[in-house]
């Protein structure tokens, strides 16, 4: 495959959706597609620009081979459309909103992917989670504890995980993401 898969991960509330939205135009200029995930939640749900489907439709799509990657997390099912394989083959780069717990699954299928871990300081993450109001205090504290399990920097399998801190200004994080891609994924097109 000629294109590069960029596997963006991070805890809920780290700002993955905001980063993707803010970087969308510069990424398109770099021949980088941003994938819309298929998620088993209502299309009216607030959050990322995803395709909301029922559990039954998700399972049907999965059985038909519609997903390149899929996983279950936080009570929801997530799928990355198999279209990405053709995009990569055609030389386009692809950014997916992935799952930290399913990085090894993605590495198995795409061994040269670029894993990017979006991090945020605990106090900032707590504030963001409280502000969005989706979870209670106990659930937020559980998310913060789980976040501590995924802060390792370095190698996972054969892949170097690159960390981006998104505790501050979003424009700075966008610039760091584009710089990371220039250095590690798409240097000939930036």
Image (cartoon, helix red, strand yellow):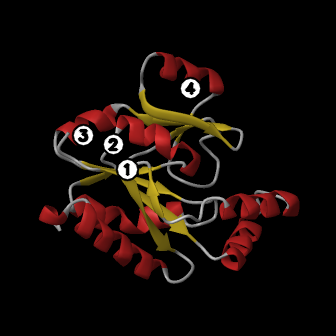
Nearest to N terminus: mark 3 or mark 1:
3
Horizontal and vertical percent position of residue 107: 40, 42
Query: Looking at this rendering, what residue extends furthest in the left direction?
Result: 188
Foreground disc of the pair 1, 4: 1
Q: Secondary structure at mark 1?
A: loop
Q: Quadrant of residue 89?
A: top left
At 51% from the left and 62% from the top, the residue drawn is 16
List the residue tagged with mark 1: 158
List the residue tagged with mark 4: 58
Q: Quadrant of residue 65?
A: top left
Of the pair 188 and 155, the residue shown nearer to us = 155
List the residue tagged with mark 3: 87
Relative side of 131 to 162, left or right: right
Nearest to N terminus: mark 1 or mark 2:
2
Pointer 3: residues within 10 angstroms few (<14), some, or many (20+)?
many
Relative side of 21 to 10, left or right: left
Q: Secondary structure at mark 2?
A: loop
Q: Secondary structure at mark 4?
A: helix
């Amino acid at each position: 495959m000629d294109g590069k898969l960029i596997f963006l991960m991070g805890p809920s509330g780290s700002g993955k959706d905001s980063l993707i939205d803010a970087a969308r135009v510069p990424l398109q200029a770099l021949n980088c597609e941003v994938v819309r995930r298929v998620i088993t939640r209502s299309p009216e749900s607030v959050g990322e620009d995803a395709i909301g489907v029922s559990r039954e439709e998700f399972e049907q799509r999965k059985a038909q081979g519609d997903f390149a990657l899929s996983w279950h997390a936080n009570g929801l099912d997530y799928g990355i459309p198999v279209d990405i394989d053709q995009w990569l083959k055609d030389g386009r780069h692809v950014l997916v909103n992935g799952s930290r717990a399913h990085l090894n699954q993605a590495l198995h299928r795409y061994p040269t992917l670029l894993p990017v871990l979006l991090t945020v300081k605990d106090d900032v993450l707590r504030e963001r989670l409280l502000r969005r109001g989706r979870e209670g205090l106990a659930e937020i504290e559980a998310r913060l504890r789980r976040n501590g399990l995924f802060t390792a920097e370095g190698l996972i399998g054969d892949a170097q995980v690159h960390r981006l801190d998104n505790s501050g200004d979003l424009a700075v994080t966008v610039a760091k993401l584009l710089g990371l891609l220039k250095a590690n994924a798409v240097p000939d097109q930036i």
